[in-house]
Amino acid sequence: MSTSTNKRPREDSENKERKVKVKVEDVPEAKLAASLPRTDENIKKEKARVPQRGAPKIGFMCPYLDTINRKVLDFDFEKVCSVSLNNFNVYACLVCGQYFQGRGKGTHAYLHALEVGHHMFINLTTEKIYCLPDNYQVHETSLEDITYNLRPTFMKKEIKRFDKEGEYYHALDGTDYLIGFMGINNIKFTEWFNVSAQALCHVPMLRDYFLFEDKYTKLVHEAERKQPQVCHPQLVLKFGEFMRKFWNPKGFKGHVSPHEVLQAVMHASRKRFTIGKHSDPIEFLAWFLNTSHLSLGGNKKRKSSIITQAFQGQVKMMTDTVVKKETRKIAPGQIEIKEQIESKITHKKFIYLSLELPRSPLFKDNQDTNFIPQVPLFDLLAKFDGVTSETLRSGEKRRFQLSKLPRYLIIHYKRFTSNNWFKEKNPTLVNFPLYNLDMSPYVAFPERPSEDDMKSKSIRELQAIMAKNKIDKTGCLSRGDLIDKINEHHDKLEKNRATRYDLIANICHVGTAKDGTYKAHVMHRGMKQWFEFEDLHINTSETMAQQVALSECYIQIYELQPPGALVKREEIDPSLDGANFVPNESGAGPGDGAAANGSASDVKVKKEKMEEDS
């Protein structure tokens, strides 16, 4: 009796082991997994291979794949359940495109599958596709385009082609679109966001950063942990998601809807910028760049985030204060005034430059009914030449000069003035160059000492100059060696100095101050063609360089040319009557003037002359 009782448990244990072995052998690659060491990680992988109860084996063809309708899929909407308005564990129906919560028994997605007969669902967070109400996961390579549209991913090789290719892609909704040149849906009075997004999405440095989610996800969560009061992670994450969908090369439709990013903007700005309310694009742009800088962990240091790396510059402010004032009589009726002036120099950082437009004339003659005032851009930039001064209320005089140029220069024209009763628009046209905007006259470069000045200095003074400019003095044995080193340093600085800009985006205002709207002009690098965007409408046939130059510009983004780049030439179409924008032949400069009042024949003569010179 004792022997029989001892053998039964051994037999039961052997049968259990056999049963386990049979279950493991039914799963693909189980033999290879069984040979691996029994670590925690391998045990988790082995459990993941075991199919769920009632689920089909891998390789099983779901019978409801043909019910998927890609034309109704739109992943731009806010990811909330259409019934409970909950944003947790939300699934999208791949048949009708609606959002529902959960997939278990009694959930809204489960009930939708039973009532309507729609069986294919995708989890908007995990990107996994399930068949309901059977509740099994579907593994099918033909559905990869759906998961890609839910969360597009990019490779560096693809991004390099964006600025070169000019091919149109055919979307499922029947529209043809260029990658990155799509319309943005105007939800309700959201043109202020649409034009700003069009401009920012075409800044290459900003685009290449937000197309890779791994670059900023950790920075955002770390900034939220350190500074939760000023950090808004959803703003950055949703804008990055919007950027990836905007540059999606496999889109189901030829436009993008900014629902989610606008929800993040409303929450982060405390409804300062909201749907259904007109806003100023420059106010939104300044707020968005500053908030994104803080949300990415940026601080007061230069280049602490992608925002300051791209847009931050530095201006030098020189304030002249009269400390002492003396008057004396020279002759009858003549007085000499002597002022002792004290100058104070401060440096301030900026994200964009604001330029004042001259006031439009209040009264017009009968002959000037069609008169439109114009001003060259270089007259407005004279504010930063270091000589032109403005008088403050305190009597102090202040001069400005740029000390550091940003990679991308944002210029804002103060076109609107408002008071308690009405808002007024200044219709003055600004004549600006599309290429070769030379900012060298407005930059305070380090002064180069003359040869006579350096020869008159002692060796110690020359060494002090080298230490101030961080010049290596190794190998310098004589005064001549020190002078040669200083000259080589300044020659290198002048060679690597970049001061010319090309226009890449232009935001203009059309209409009156009360009933007007905004439009965006963007340059396609590969096609060398300008595109005009007004919400969903894209103009590619009539929008040329002349229309851009003659628009009532409000915000412009210029890109810095690399050092030593060739001077680009602008092509002018002589068929345009009344074209007032005539670039000079050597690239517009402040001394030459970027605008001239001439007829179409004058423009044609200038173009022929340029062709002869070339």
Image (cartoon, rainbow, N blue to C red):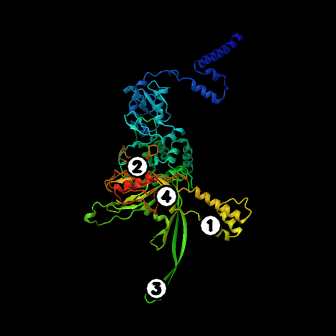
Q: Is 439 placed left or right of 515 in the picture?
A: right
For numbered disc 1, what is the local secondary structure? Answer: loop
Q: Nearer the viewer, residue 511 or 504?
A: 504
Q: Which residue is mark 3?
A: 335
- Closer to the chain start, of discs 2 and 3, is 3
Q: Which residue is mark 4?
A: 438
* C-alpha gap between disc 4 and disc 2: 21 Å
| Category of crowding for the residue at label 1, using alpha-carbon neighbours closer than 10 angstroms: few (below 14), some (14–19), many (at least 20) | few
Q: Amino acid at mark 1?
A: Pro
Residue 569 visible in the current orientation:
yes
- Closer to the chain start, of discs 1 and 3, is 3
For numbered disc 3, what is the local secondary structure? Answer: strand
Point out which mark residue 521 bears.
2
For numbered disc 4, what is the local secondary structure? Answer: strand
Instruction: State the residue lying farthest toward the bottom.
Output: 332
Q: Amino acid at mark 2?
A: His
Q: Quadrant of residue 282?
A: bottom left
* C-alpha gap between disc 3 and disc 4: 44 Å
Could you tell me residue 393's position as x and y percent? 44, 72
Looking at the rendering, in which quadrant would you find the N terminus?
top right
